[in-house]
Image: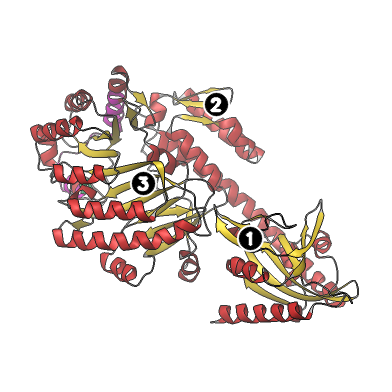
Amino acid sequence: MRNAFTARRAVLPWRNKRALPEPEAAGLRERLHRELCSPGGRLAYIHVPFCANHCLFCGFYRYAHTADAATRYASLLAEELALGGKAASVASGGVEALYLGGGTPSALSARDLDRVLSAARSHLPLTADCEITLEGRITHFNDEKIDACLAAGVNRISIGVQSFDTGVRRRQGRKSDRNEVLRFLEGLRKREGFALVIDLLYGLPGQTPEIWRQDLAAAIELEPDGIDLYGLNLIPGTPLHKAVGLGKFPALGGLDSLGEMYEIGARALAGAGWAQLSNSHWRRTLLERNRYNLQIKQGRDCMAFGAGGGGSAALYSYAVNSDLEAYERAVTMGERPIAGVWVADELHPIRCAVTAGFEVGKLDLAALTACLDDDVGQSMFSLVRQWQSAGLLDLDDGIIRLTLAGRFWYSNLIFAFDALLSESLAARQSTERSSIVTQASNLQALRAELAKNPGGILEALAVQYGVSQQAVVDALPEEMRTCIAGSAFVDVMQDLAGWGKMTVIVHTPDVIMECHADVPMGKLGHGFYNLQGGDGPLSGHLRPERCGAIYFLRRPFMGKETLSVQFFNTDGDAMFKVYVGRDENRELKAGQIERFNELERKLTAQEAA
Ligand code: SF4
């Protein structure tokens, strides 16, 4: 518990992600949550960046609350929710948990809280049992505001108490004393229809183990539905960090005392019969679901709103502009105020499984390593055995169960697994780099072959020369091919829907499937482009975000000229191809040739613009 590692690692949401340069990020902004989204349910987060004052330990403080600024901000939020809702309505995975965090959402007036929550309910596809959490502070959170929140659907209120002790509170800049905190929470407890959650912080200056025990006892006695325990993280740049550096506060207790306090907290809650939902969350009643916090760790998509919020869609993460002026400018111009976009690596789903498993203290290591290369799996098992002998976990039949000490150090375990995964990825990429040299000479030979015989079978050439199918197409003589970005997928498919009967081909190593039919119209939903073929010969579900490139090809095949539109995924493999149809004389249909040329021209001009 006390000395397994020399420091506690923070699990930051943007770890293992690469910031995209602006031109690339700009092209993605409007597609987030519209085309780029994971199937299934999702989450939503609304950020309110105002606080009544700056608590010394806090790294999230951004703007001082003023009534005028907060009211203006609530209007902008309502507009932004309407903008984002347009995207959400296309891809219709329901929002299962909505979280209003900050900052201090409860600093907004009753009218503004109602406005923001009503906009969320009108514009986001909230599920019928959506968990709606509001983060609040005791100061200024009056009955009128609480009524407004509950009337607008809030069903979970999380109060950041941190400590009940007046001395500890005052030292951190909190104005209310122990009695005021207790009175407020007792009043809140008497109300019904929502889960009340109390957040406590351990390791604060002056918070001795005895005071911590009193904090826990007071929280348990209030009988909220949930209690969260967080260890103080001395964040560089915070007033507390500076004050400790200047010697204004006694040096904080080390990891020893933090570990001891976590143990005291976990044992107190277990002793009082509370169930542990994750390493830092406990519940007394089933009203507390903790859905948002658990699902965000699982890597669920999260739609983010409000200056300083952060969201995610499939492999992408993004930050809403935290600068209020820039945020306002974008929203009033009707643009999503997204400041930056990051992309995760291909191991993202595995990393999410690791984070989600360690978060709840249980991870199926056998199932996890079955998806990985043998050497990575072996390294993970050998690390786990070391942790087992250090008392951080039990391993039984391939399943990891964290001990209390393991739960305290869980972020370090995630960090270590992340590092192993990154090493394995780097090793694989270096092998791929050395094969690029071989590929370069293969490509030269392939180009020469296609210059002589451009009618070869593309799939067979890819295998023969050890390159992707897209690389084969790129090796065709230039006048035979036009490449368009995969982001035009929906536009191209919807245009093809008006061309008449064509030949659609899906070619995999095992089958060549052909269908002679009209390409049906389709629409986006659940992350797919869904063909609305009805009882017709062609229907199905296509994934637009997998499309990396679209080619317009003119080339001879079996002695005849062909025109085709070919779709390639981001790995360079063919998704499917659509060939211009032939008339009764086996000639290419004149009307479709025109449509082909026209669409090619239009998309080329759009890309050049
Ligand atoms: S702890 Fe909460 S109220 Fe205090 S500064 Fe941080 S975000 Fe604001």
Residue contact at pointers 2 and 3, CB within 8 angstroms: no
Q: CA distance from mark 1 to mark 3?
A: 32 Å
Q: Nearer the viewer, mark 2 or mark 3?
A: 3
Q: CA distance from mark 2 to mark 1?
A: 34 Å
Q: SS at mark 2?
A: strand
**Marks 1 and 3: CB-CB under 8 Å?**
no
Q: Within 10 angstroms of label 3, few (less than 14), some, or many (20 or more) residues?
A: many
Q: Are marks 2 and 1 in contact (CB under 8 Å)?
A: no
Q: Percent position (x, y) of residue 89?
A: 46, 57
Are there few (<14), some (14-19), or many (20+) residues within 10 Å of tag 1? some
Q: Which residue is mark 1?
A: 570
Under mark 2, the amino acid is: Ile
Q: Which residue does the image show at 40% across and 43% down from the upper left?
A: 11
**Which residue is label 3 attached to?**
98
Horizontal placement of 183 versus 17: left or right?
left
Which callout, 2 or 3, points at the residue further toward the start of the chain?
Answer: 3
The kind of residue on which mark 3 rests is Leu
Q: Nearer the viewer, mark 1 or mark 3?
A: 3
Which residue position holds label 2? 399
Q: Residue type at mark 1?
A: Thr
Label 2, label 3: how far apart the Cα atoms are? 32 Å
